[in-house]
Amino acid sequence: MIEITSNTELPSIRKDIELHTSDGEVLVGELALPKDKPVKTTLITLHPLPTHGGFMDSHLLRKMANRLPELISAAVLRFNTRGTQSPRGTSSGSFSDGIGERFDVAAAVDFCKKEGLVKPWLVGWSFGTELAIKYGPDLDIAGAILLSPPLRRATQEDLKRWENLPIPLVALIPEHDEFLNPEQAREKFSVLPRAKLLEFDGEKHLWVGESATRRVLNAIAEEVAPGSSPLPTSY
């Protein structure tokens, strides 16, 4: 048995992929699949703001891909939105401030459908939550999980669109988030009473450290695979 730490990569099948958007962009990404077991849930990850260092390898998303295929039999899709660069490569196009990115999210959902993966959850972090909130209602998804939603581009009108959808919207709110703290989140999400807000004492927007990572991954696991948390800390 070894302790699962920041750089631990558990067994999985990793595939470099490309997503082709309906407006002609080519997005680079990776699909991580369980090894020798069926996929039970699918996660499409949406990264933080690319103009401030967000990309498909942002640490929480990388750790989801490194751990959750083995621990909860999840398929984890990561990709760079238009114009975003990472070691995997650079997606074509240019940053569109959350507007043109609607085609990026749709392309990821279409890819999962064509691959025969179970209906995906959108898992957005920061800027990625804006995309999940704004465009999730138009897509065939299982639900959305929001990590540190700033609610800058996504409006309360966008939130109201979720009211009559038969799928969950779950938000993880750090106590010391400089963009949207728990008190502010309760006010903003009041237009969507059925939204599930999970508040995390002591945490900040970037969820730094292994303890924060475990709290996030446990919360995600419990939503998409009830009864699977707490996740093991050694393997």
Image (cartoon, helix red, strand yellow):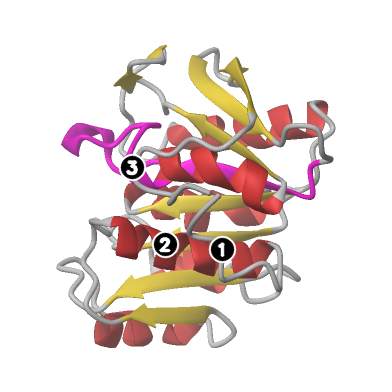
Instruction: Name the element at disc 1.
Output: loop
Residue at the (79%, 42%) spot, across then down: 39
Instruction: Name the element at disc 3.
Output: helix
52 up-or-down from 197: above or below: above
Which comes sooner in the sequence, label 1 or label 3?
Answer: 3
Name the kind of residue labelled 1 in the image.
Answer: Leu
Residue at the (54%, 45%) spot, across then down: 67
Span shown in magenta: 39-60
Residue on which the image places disc 1: 231
Decide if residue 151 is in sight here: no
Q: Nearer the viewer, residue 68 or 186?
A: 68
The quarter of the displayed image where residue 232 is located: bottom right
Residue at the (54%, 73%) spot, across then down: 160
Q: Nearer the viewer, residue 207 or 6?
A: 6
Name the kind of residue labelled 3 in the image.
Answer: His
Residue on which the image places disc 2: 214
- Give residue 59's mark: 3
- The answer to whether 155 appears left or right of 108 in the picture is left
- Give residue 182's mark: none
171 up-or-down from 134: above or below: below
Which comes sooner in the sequence, label 2 or label 1?
Answer: 2
Near mark 3 (Cα within 10 A), the count class, few <14, some 14-19 or many ≥20, is: some
- The answer to whether 121 appears left or right of 29 in the picture is right
Name the kind of residue labelled 2 in the image.
Answer: Arg
The quarter of the displayed image where residue 178 is located: bottom left
Instruction: Name the element at disc 2.
Output: helix
Residue at the (36%, 86%) spot, across then down: 186
